[in-house]
Amino acid sequence: MIDQSSQPVLDVSNVSVRFGSLMACSDISLSVRAGEVLGIVGESGSGKSTLLRCIGGYSRPDSGSVRVLSREGGAVDLWRADEVARMQLRQAELSLVHQNPRDGLLMHISAGGNIVEPLMAGGERHYEKLLSTAEDWLAKVELPTGRLKSVPAEFSGGMQKRLQIARSLVTRPRLLLMDEPTGGLDVSVQARLLDLLRQLVRELKIAAIVVTHDLAVARVLAQRLVVMKDGEVVETGLTDQILEDPQHPYTQLLVGAALRI
């Protein structure tokens, strides 16, 4: 029996992606364990979103491997698996919170339907169980259970983000990927959403990656940071250490700019 507690949930090794003459990601390696949040930070164009798409199974890297720990035991290389196996791995083990919640929601069906649709796709058909699960998750993300039949278009941006989080976590994936999870929200709404995300990651003991240009978001959510510039990792380490004593000149610029805001 494999001791999964000692294994990384995600192990990325030497991933590179090129778009024509542009090297979007150059020889990137990282790992994340259960209960840990890794932040990937950098300016627009640094390659962080491209890397996230490779990790999530949306864009194939030109080289390198993305290995995800499966429930059956052992790590599976996402990009060496066949299409069916990759889809099954993504459905069972991975979930992505999109920057724009409309990209992660079914806008024409109810809030409750959005939450339970991933479970139904996995074969769950018991109506009472689905209804109870939808209500439980609305409560978990601090949305009124009375809005179960409302469609996402009737929700504010912050409420749509919360609904997308419920939809993303209902299957209890091993790995949660977050792309600018607080983008476009007011500061007060951001704070509540960050508290919620931190609480759920801790409660569910999942591994998570947050991609953001906002160092304040990284400080709240991530225990470790990866700093990217022009497709390369320029600095890694504990979040507090990097933000309080950045070593690379680019990281120093990022931290200095954040302090001036």
Image: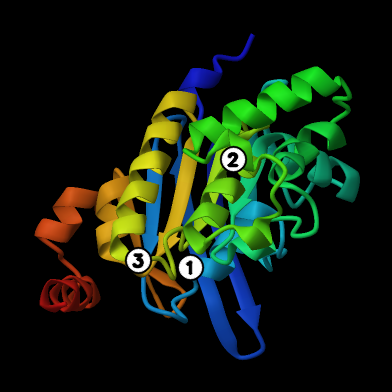
Circle 3 is placed at which residue position? 186
Q: Give above or below for 167 relative to 250.
A: above
Looking at the image, residue 227 sits to the left or right of residue 205; the answer is: left
Residue drawn at the location 48% of the way across and 36% of the way down: 207
- Which residue bears the numbered disc 2? 166
Q: Which residue is mark 1?
A: 48
The front one of 216 and 131 is 131
Residue 260 in which image quadrant: bottom left
**What kind of residue is marked 3?**
Asp
**Residue positioned most to the front:** 146
Residue 92 sits in quarter: top right
Report x, y in % for residue 227: 33, 65
Q: Position of residue 32 (x, y in %)?
A: 45, 40
Nearer-N-terminus badge (2/3): 2
Of tags 1 and 2, the one toward the viewer is 2
Q: Residue 151, image x and y in percent?
A: 71, 54
